[in-house]
Image (spheres, coloured by chain):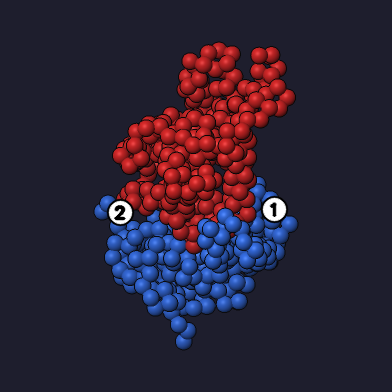
Chain colours: A blue, B red
């Protein structure tokens, strides 16, 4: 039995009386790909925001690696090993492709302000190492030739891959992917699926929000279905597919679409 | 005075004043980038740079040492200001930070007046009172120091932001706070550092201009206003914009006060600011889409 990397207990979140997430408990085991699905407004984004530290839960606990993280600011969670991509790409568009990934490795830099100003030789060596590691990542995702390009000029599909590369630069243990295939044409969505799958084979734990059912069903070891902020089902693709409440709430309308 | 030598004389004066404006504008821009706010305490740091240099000159006989220490002290003052006044804000919106900075500027001015006095102070230039004559133009050696040190500072800042990891983190946090935090950048720290850099730049401007103009506690608002105009002129939030805006404003003032009337020297900055706000609010180098407050 593998260890639970992420554990969510009795999580609630409400904004001005509107309940976004209610009494939600689930866990993510190390090494698995878990998908969170549900109709729009089901609470998926709120859940992601609470795990990443953007939104405070109204009640409940989030544990990462057996330690509570629900009180920590975002950057501390990132430093513990939680990385994410955003539903609407949040790339540093005015920086180069390489710099975007280098910022992801920023926390590997020990340098303070004084060193940065004096630009010591130790610092330069460190920067070269960070640049080289960032370059390796770009190479792996086929973006090496674009390293010096301004990120904002990349195509949508390339930006999606770049954002993934940037989040991997943090060397996370848990990757939160918010609709990685959204907006991608068929072939590119498939390639994104392959990338995620290969990361997982290398040991990456993934929590995935995605509307592309083909991707969800083929990638996920385990699927959590939310509706109106509550869990309505959890299990393997086959189990979830047959669940009557899921069919009623979600899959029926998704397949029509 | 011959027309051509008058022209050169004005050019030198404009570049020298423009350098000072560029430094102040850089302070505005760095804080704007990290917070989206206009920091109206910027001008007070210029005054502090000059007045503390004068004070320290009593203890350290070298003008250079006194100025360096003064600039570092003001930078620390800038860091403390952020830590004590900006950081505690519960909802630090751009508008709120701007308003708080006005309060900060008034407090800083009073603090300077009470601790350093109301009398204008000055000190000799870094090369004494040496004057240089070159091709019919005569100017103080300090002018070269002003232009040279400003240039050096701008080059260092450029490499800091473009090359160093910390500089990249600052730019990332300025571009998208949420995305920067998610890759582990501590956004509060980047704001703190931006205030430190802004105070350093302002104090440097004050320390190098004081030998030519004297420093007095009540000049902060005017320095701040000129730097603000330069920042708006060049394009708020951009490093090259600060340089272009500063130099353009310095040259406009120098030529305007000679060819129109020296009475209009300060009015020119006001007129430029209004014109820019009417015609091209994003500044000469700014893009229309960068300003989101």
Q: Which chain hosts label 2?
A: A
Q: Give me the disc on residue B248.
A: none
**Image quadrant where one finds the C terminus of chain B:** top left
Please report the residue visible at 55 percent of the width from the left and 63 percent of the height from the top.
A111
- Residue furthest left as drawn: A17
Q: Quadrant of residue B44?
A: top left
Q: Which residue is mark 1?
A: A148
In front of the other: label 1 or label 2?
A: 1
Please report the residue visible at 47 percent of the width from the left and 84 percent of the height from the top.
A2
- Cβ–Cβ under 8 Å for marks 1 and 2: no
Q: Is A11 displayed left or right of A107 in the figure? A: left
Is residue B171 in sight in this rendering? yes
Q: Position of residue A242 (x, y in %)?
A: 45, 72
Q: Nearer the viewer, residue A37 or B67?
A: B67
Q: Which residue is mark 2?
A: A15
Q: Nearer the viewer, residue B192 or A78?
A: B192
Q: Position of residue B128 (x, y in %)?
A: 57, 37
Q: Position of residue A247 (x, y in %)?
A: 43, 65
Please report the residue visible at 29 percent of the width from the left and 62 percent of the height from the top.
A58
Q: Quadrant of residue A125?
A: bottom right
Disc 1/disc 2 C-alpha distance (Å)? 42 Å
Q: Which chain hosts label 1?
A: A
**Image quadrant where one finds the N terminus of chain B:** top right
Is residue A257 in sight in this rendering? no
């Amino acid at each position: 039995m593998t260890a639970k990397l992420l554990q969510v207990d009795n999580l609630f979140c409400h904004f001005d009386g509107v309940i976004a997430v209610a009494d939600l408990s689930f866990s993510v085991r190390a090494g698995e790909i878990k998908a969170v699905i549900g109709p729009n407004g089901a609470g998926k984004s709120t859940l992601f925001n609470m795990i990443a530290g953007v939104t405070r839960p109204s009640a409940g606990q989030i544990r990462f690696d057996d330690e509570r993280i629900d009180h920590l600011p975002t950057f501390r969670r990132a430093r513990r090993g939680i990385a994410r991509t955003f539903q609407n790409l949040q790339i540093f568009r005015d920086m180069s492709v390489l710099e975007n990934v280098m910022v992801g490795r920023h926390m590997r830099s020990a340098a303070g302000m004084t060193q940065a100003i004096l630009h010591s030789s130790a610092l330069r060596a460190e920067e070269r190492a960070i640049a080289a590691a960032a370059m390796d990542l770009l190479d792996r995702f086929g973006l090496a030739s674009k390293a010096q390009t301004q990120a904002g000029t990349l195509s949508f599909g390339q930006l999606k891959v770049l954002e993934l590369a940037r989040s991997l630069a943090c060397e996370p243990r848990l990757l939160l992917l918010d609709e990685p295939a959204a907006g991608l044409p068929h072939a590119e969505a498939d390639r994104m699926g392959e990338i995620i799958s290969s990361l997982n084979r290398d040991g990456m734990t993934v929590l995935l929000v995605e509307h592309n059912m083909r991707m969800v069903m083929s990638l996920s070891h385990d699927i959590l279905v939310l509706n109106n902020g509550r869990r309505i089902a959890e299990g393997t693709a086959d189990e979830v597919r047959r669940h009557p409440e899921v069919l009623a709430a979600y899959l029926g309308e998704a397949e029509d679409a | 005075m011959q027309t051509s030598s008058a022209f050169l004389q004005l050019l030198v004066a404009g570049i020298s004043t423009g350098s000072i404006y560029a430094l102040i504008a850089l302070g505005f821009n760095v804080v704007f980038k990290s917070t989206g706010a206009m920091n109206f305490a910027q001008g007070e740091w210029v005054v502090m740079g000059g007045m503390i240099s004068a004070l320290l000159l009593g203890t350290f006989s070298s003008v250079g040492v006194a100025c360096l220490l003064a600039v570092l002290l003001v930078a620390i003052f800038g860091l403390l200001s952020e830590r004590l006044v900006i950081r505690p804000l519960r909802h630090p919106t751009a508008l709120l930070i701007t308003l708080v900075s006005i309060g900060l500027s008034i407090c800083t001015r009073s603090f300077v007046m009470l601790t350093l006095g109301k009398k204008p102070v000055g000190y000799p230039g870094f090369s004494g009172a040496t004057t240089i004559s070159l091709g019919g133009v005569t100017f103080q050696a300090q002018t070269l120091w002003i232009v040279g040190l400003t240039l050096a500072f701008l080059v260092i800042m450029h490499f800091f932001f473009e090359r160093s990891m910390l500089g990249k983190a600052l730019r990332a946090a300025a571009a998208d706070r949420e995305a920067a935090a998610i890759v582990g950048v501590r956004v509060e720290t980047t704001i703190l550092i931006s205030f430190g850099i802004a105070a350093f730049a302002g104090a440097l401007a004050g320390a190098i201009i004081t030998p030519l103009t004297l420093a007095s506690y009540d000049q902060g608002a005017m320095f701040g206003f000129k730097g603000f105009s330069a920042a708006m002129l060049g394009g708020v939030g951009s490093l090259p914009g600060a340089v272009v805006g500063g130099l353009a404003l310095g040259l406009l003032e120098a030529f305007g006060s000679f060819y129109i009337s020296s009475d209009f020297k300060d009015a020119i900055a006001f007129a430029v600011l209004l014109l820019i706000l009417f015609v091209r609010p994003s500044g000469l180098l700014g893009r229309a889409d960068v300003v989101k407050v």
